[in-house]
Image: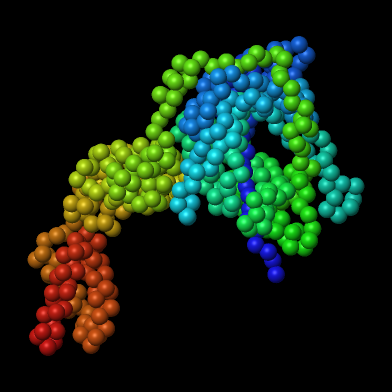
């Protein structure tokens, strides 16, 4: 019988800062999936002897925006250090990072889980530089079946030296769900602050969980393993879940968990050993002799603090209070700043419409159209004002809900207004009671068998009859009026002994 264990998980997140130039030189930051390899390289990021790094002020500003948004304590003076570790794609042979004296410490991030809100402590936020990119070219082996061996490796230094922000949490998470919630919350925050592209597929944000387990109720940490360079939320959650199960099985078998760095193989759903896990002393950190201490002007820090936007968690709480939205709706609408802005613009354009109704249209029909076409909200041809105008036509009874959905799809694909589409296609809702009474009467006359079944007690047939009336009206009849009239005529038949 297996024992009960408690996972203990902390995350290291590396986020590329969206500056125009690199961390310590003037080389431009380019899209490494598009740019010619090694086209944005100079003697500094190529690691030539005798070159001197210079700190990118915009990178420091972006780092401060994140640290302040995480409520960290900002160090008046911080130090850069050399992290001596062999990176084949970082040619100078060490990485400039921060260690003993980082930019910021002791922050917090509120996450949303199925159990409610939870605060995860932030241990440190510090600046460093990214590495280059390796591409391994493989060739077939010497005749053995399935044997593959690398022929050579290509190095692209376009990414080497790109500003990187490392955000290290305390080991405050205890499940794959909490880890996923933390990663999503941090991703949303970085996007709100406009310091990171959020494009995880291109490596703009890489996540490295440190996982250990211990007997439930114990306060002693187990042996931790780190999983490197995860770049999808789903992959992160699956990797953490697998590692928890792997370590639990080892302890159940009386074996020990080895401290190591592991890699995630997504298509197999497993982690594998990469190397034994290093400790800080293995990197032989020492102060970077070519860079002076990073001394911050307090007035500049206060100016950056004052410029921060309303943050995702604060906006979520406001949406719940101001617009009476559920926690789920508020979370969906505030996850991306452009979505929250779109929603609020639509609400402002239709004060007669309940904010919850507008939330339903955005999270339902509009998101569905965007997903079908692969568009982002920024590319959406339906403006907030245009969507609000359509929703008002539905809620005021000018058109019914079904017609409204058809009109929205037409707006999305043609760019026309709701009014223009309704007028050109004759889609106004029929609410005239005498016209609808005639349609109901005709449907009942044309379907005597179904009417007899209803009168015999099969009341569910009323829904089928309703559908026939709506079909006769080409979907334009007022559903509420149709239901009322259908019920009226059927009851009359019962009362008259039909």
Residue that appears at 68% across and 64% down: 3
Q: Is 316 in front, or is 2? A: 2
In this figure, which colouring scheme has been used for the structure? rainbow
Q: Position of residue 17 (x, y in %)?
A: 56, 28
370 left or right of 199? left
Residue that appears at 55% across and 52% down: 177
Q: Quadrant of the C terminus?
A: bottom left
Q: Position of residue 336 (x, y in %)?
A: 43, 40
* Number of marks: 0
Q: Position of residue 371 (x, y in %)?
A: 45, 48
Q: Quadrant of the N terminus?
A: bottom right
268 left or right of 406? right
Q: In the figure, 162 relative to 411: above or below? A: above
Residue that appears at 23% across and 42% down: 350
Q: Position of residue 342 (x, y in %)?
A: 35, 39
Residue that appears at 63% across and 53% down: 7
Q: Is 194 in front, or is 168? A: 168
Q: Is 414 in front, or is 430? A: 430
187 left or right of 145? left
Visible residue check, residue 37: no
Q: In the figure, 57 relative to 205: above or below? A: above
164 left or right of 445? right
Visible residue check, residue 284: yes
């Amino acid at each position: 019988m297996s024992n009960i264990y408690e996972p203990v998980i902390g995350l290291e997140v590396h986020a590329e800062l969206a500056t125009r130039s690199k961390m310590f030189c003037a080389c431009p930051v380019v899209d490494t999936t598009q740019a010619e390899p090694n086209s944005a390289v100079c003697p500094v990021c190529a690691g030539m002897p005798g070159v001197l790094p210079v700190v990118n002020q915009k990178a420091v500003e972006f780092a401060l925006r994140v640290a302040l948004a995480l409520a960290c304590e900002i160090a008046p003076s911080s130090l850069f250090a050399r992290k001596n570790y062999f990176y084949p794609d970082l040619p100078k042979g060490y990485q400039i990072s921060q260690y003993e004296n980082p930019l910021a410490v002791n922050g917090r991030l509120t996450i949303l889980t199925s159990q409610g809100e939870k605060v995860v402590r932030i241990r440190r936020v510090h600046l460093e530089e990214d590495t280059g990119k390796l591409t391994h070219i493989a060739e077939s082996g010497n005749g053995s079946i399935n044997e593959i061996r690398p022929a050579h490796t290509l190095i692209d230094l376009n990414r080497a030296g790109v500003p990187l922000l490392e955000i290290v949490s305390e080991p405050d998470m205890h499940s794959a769900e909490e880890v996923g919630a933390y990663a999503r919350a941090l991703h949303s925050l970085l996007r709100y602050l406009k310091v990171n592209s959020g494009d995880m597929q291109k490596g703009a944000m890489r996540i490295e969980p440190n996982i250990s387990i211990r007997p439930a109720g114990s306060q002693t940490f187990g042996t931790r393993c780190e999983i490197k360079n995860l770049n999808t939320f789903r992959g992160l959650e699956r990797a953490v879940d697998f590692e928890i199960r792997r370590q639990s099985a080892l302890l159940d078998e009386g074996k020990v968990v080895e401290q190591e760095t592991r890699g995630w193989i997504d298509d197999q759903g497993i982690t594998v050993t990469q190397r034994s896990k290093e400790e800080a002393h293995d990197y032989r950190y020492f102060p970077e002799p070519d860079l002076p201490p990073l001394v911050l002007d307090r007035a500049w820090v206060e100016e950056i603090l004052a410029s921060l936007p309303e943050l995702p968690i604060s906006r979520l709480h406001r949406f719940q209070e101001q617009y009476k939205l559920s926690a789920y709706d508020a979370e969906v609408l505030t996850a991306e700043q452009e979505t929250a802005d779109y929603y609020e613009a639509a609400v402002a354009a239709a004060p007669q419409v309940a904010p919850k109704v507008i939330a339903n249209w955005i999270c339902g029909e509009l998101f569905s159209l965007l997903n079908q076409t692969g568009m982002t909200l920024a590319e959406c041809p339906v403006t907030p004002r245009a969507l609000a105008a359509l929703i008002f036509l539905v809620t005021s009874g000018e058109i019914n809900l079904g017609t409204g959905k058809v009109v929205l799809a037409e707006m999305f694909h043609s760019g026309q207004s709701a009014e223009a589409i309704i007028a050109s296609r004759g889609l106004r809702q029929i609410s005239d009671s005498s016209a609808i009474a005639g349609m109901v009467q005709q449907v009942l006359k044309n379907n005597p068998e179904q009417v007899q079944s209803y009168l015999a007690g099969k009341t569910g047939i009323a829904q089928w009859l309703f559908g026939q009336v709506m079909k006769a009206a080409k979907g334009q009849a007022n559903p509420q009026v149709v239901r009322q009239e259908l019920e009226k005529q059927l009851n009359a038949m019962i009362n008259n002994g039909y």
